Amino acid sequence: MSRAALIARRTTVSVVVLLLVAALIVAGVVYGAVRRTDPTVTGTVRLAGLSGEVDVRRDGQGVAHIYADTPEDLFRAQGYVAAQDRFFEMDLRRHATAGRLAELVGEAGVASDISVRTMGWRRVAEQELPTLSADTRRYLAAYADGVNTYLDTTGDATRVAPEYLMLSVRFPGYRIEPWGPVDSLAWLKAMAWDLHGNYADELARARLMAQGRSLDEVRELYPSYDAKAQPPILSPSAWSPSGVHGGRSKAPAAGIRQGAGPAPDPESDAALGRAAQAVSAIAPLVGRGEGIGSNSWVVGPSRSSTGKPLLANDPHLALAQPGIWHQTALHCRTVSQACPYDVSGFSFAGFPGVVIGHNQRIAWGFTNLDPDVSDFYLERVKAGTVLKDGRYQPLTTRTERIRVAGGADRTITVRSTSHGPLMSDVDAAVKDAAAVPTAATTASPATPAEGESLAIALRWTGLEVTQTADAIFRMNRATSFETFRAALSSFAAPSQNAIYADVDGHIGYQAPGRVPVRRSGTAGAPPGYLPAPGWDSRYDWTGYVPFDQMPRTLDPPEGFVVTANQAVTTATTPFLTTDWTHGWRSTRIRQLLTAQPTVSPQRMRDIQGDVNDGFQPVLTAALRGVDLSGDSFTREGQATLEGWDGRFVTGDSHSSRAAAYYTAAWSALLHRTFDDDLPTGLRPDGGSRWPAVVRQLLADPRSPWWDNQKTLRIETRDDILRQAQVDARLELTRLTGKDVKAWDYGRLHTLTLRHPLSAAAPGMLRSLLDRGPEPAPGNPLTPNSLGYDLQVGYATDWGPSMRMVVDLGTLDASTWVQSTGVSGHPTSNHYDDQTGRWLRNEPFAWPFSRQAVEGATRDQLTLAPRDNG
């Protein structure tokens, strides 16, 4: 080598080394800046307002078990700990629920802010606060004091959480505002919004009918619930309705034909399109995917191997980093009437108390009941008035100013009718919002009267003043089914399936929530199935289902209760909804529970991890029924289905290869069948409704839905089944390779836990904030339900946000796990320390007794009263 070449080589090596050292220095500086936000979890800290010392013991997963002598000290400490672990998450939610997200993240938050301000979530929360019990108001205030005390000890925002350091680079000067009780209450509105009713389906059906689809065709895409094949939650022997009337369609059909589709109405098309854009713009905080709402079941002593009840719950919500749940335990040192709390479980950072869990005597879990608690109304607007029963009434208006970090402020005018805010106004206020082509409601006239325009108003129970916050604290201190039901009587939104068990051996179920009673539906359809004419009061709500007439049971004859968002009962009164999640998961869970005489705690956990899909045998048989002998390449893929055990697992196995092929074929089948018939936004996502649709179509080989409208020939069922398998083989070849033995479901179905700010973060920080991708088992229909949207791809973005199994015989034998960890700090050991165990369905021990907590303690912090002298 020449001297010049040697010098050049040495220079290159030196430059590379220097760049590497510089990168390490930058990484070190960034890591150090992030690390300084990690909270102190040992020693003694003095807090103003405490009446006595509070003991905060953190276990091996960083979960805080808090001991105090008064409820106010308990919730003050909970606020302090929540701020330690998750304050940026709390602040982000606070801004989103107040319609102030743009103040924190800039232009990206404007669309969500306009929608939230139009609905007025925080305005409702402000109205709710004075209606709550004195105890609840004290607890919310104490919690806020604890949060603010922590903020006072940290100084500037960049020492509270690393996200503020990121945001300060683009939007300098941000100052954290003190936390207040309304900040906690507004979070309940977000939870209720993400988990409420059929608003998306209602708009979708209206869009379909404006495209010329008849009501009968729409019903084919929204098949009725099959209660014989997929048993509802309560059998007739467990509960019978006590007679709520209303809910059947009694009004005239308002100008729609069932056989042929209605004539399109461009005016209402545009209004519905703007409303659809408005509701889709809201930042997802809890997260909503098809079937979101979860699994829970409870078995009584006769069905339990322990002789005591066992209760399981795993809510299916959006999967992100950090996770939605903040595990905690709240213990009065001496449980008494003055200090009645001895409770442990899953809370939301930002709201005091425990949402799901157990106390010293009872356990409870939730899944989404998902009744129809909202309606869209087509309104005839003229200038500043709206038509109602032949007369024009004034619209209610208010002005909202939206501040935008790094940009110009926005001012919007919110208009409302007697039904609620005009959501169709929102789209026009969002800069550069894409127009969504949608359809007329079937209740609309052909054209508005002279001078009128059409708009869409939203009525939703979440925009009414209720006392859901009271219910949380009452549940936490309930000790019997009677007191538990009394607590749930004020649980207004979101309406849930609540399961119950206690140490005395009782199990039960209660459906709480504010559910409207309607006199009529539109176009011969059930109430809430389609948007209603706002100008006709016959379509208005007439009241709410009384709590005592909501479905319930105590110690049912079967000895167990399963809820997984399926229909509650076969009864039509009270009318709850037509849009039940089809019971694929619930039916599988029932099969597994009844396969053995008794169920052990480990069996409960195994069921949570089950990855068998009840629709799979139906589609597998159809796919295998197609003769591919003349196409050896595609036949290699089809052959993976032979001898498949039906499990959706990852790794190098026959099951994993078959699961990959099946999923690709299912996706291709949906695309081939429906993409030519349905507009973007209404095409199949692969959730539980679509197997029900396809199951019906498989029995009709020449259904018009099979035909591809873009070809000259008429396709049949077998044509589409064949083409779907060709597509699947090519898709897997492209994604995972030509060799079938290399196929792995885990290479398709992956999980990436993304932080809300990671998309805007530099690569180094993005890798610090996000986790994954990791191979993920299951699918939307398996009990271990890790869902996807097949219009986007195969990756999962929702699933069991946590899992718990409570043993009412020995509470310390209970187990729990969540999808991430309790900490929101990326450099904390507890940022993602539960993810691996969660993916493998290997939960952690859940200590509850003082002895068990002391044995599990890894860090101890004492919060002591501050000497004000």
Image (cartoon, grey):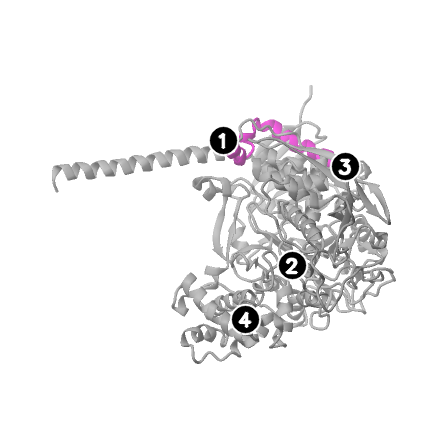
Q: Which residues are magenta?
A: 140-169
Q: Which mark is residue 291?
A: 2
Q: Which residue is mark 4?
A: 646
Q: Is residue 4 visible?
A: yes
Marks 3 and 4: in contact by CB < 8 Å?
A: no
Above or below residue 283? Residue 198 is below
Q: Nearer the viewer, residue 10 or 205?
A: 205
User: In this view, which residue lies farthest toward the top?
Assistant: 869
Above or below residue 770? Residue 438 is below
Q: Amino acid at mark 3?
A: Thr
Q: Amino acid at mark 2?
A: Gly
Q: Is residue 41 visible?
A: no
Please tell me how crowded label 3 is: few (under 14), some (14-19), or many (20+) other residues with Cα within 10 Å. Answer: few
Which quadrant is home to the N terminus?
A: top left
Is residue 166 one of those drawn in magenta?
Answer: yes
Please tell me how crowded label 1 is: few (under 14), some (14-19), or many (20+) other residues with Cα within 10 Å. Answer: few
Cα gap from disc 2 to disc 3, whole angstroms: 36 Å
Image depth: mark 2 or mark 4 in front: 2
Marks 4 and 2: in contact by CB < 8 Å?
A: no
Q: Which residue is mark 1?
A: 169
User: In this view, which residue lies farthest toward the front?
Assistant: 450
Cα gap from disc 4 to disc 1, whole angstroms: 51 Å
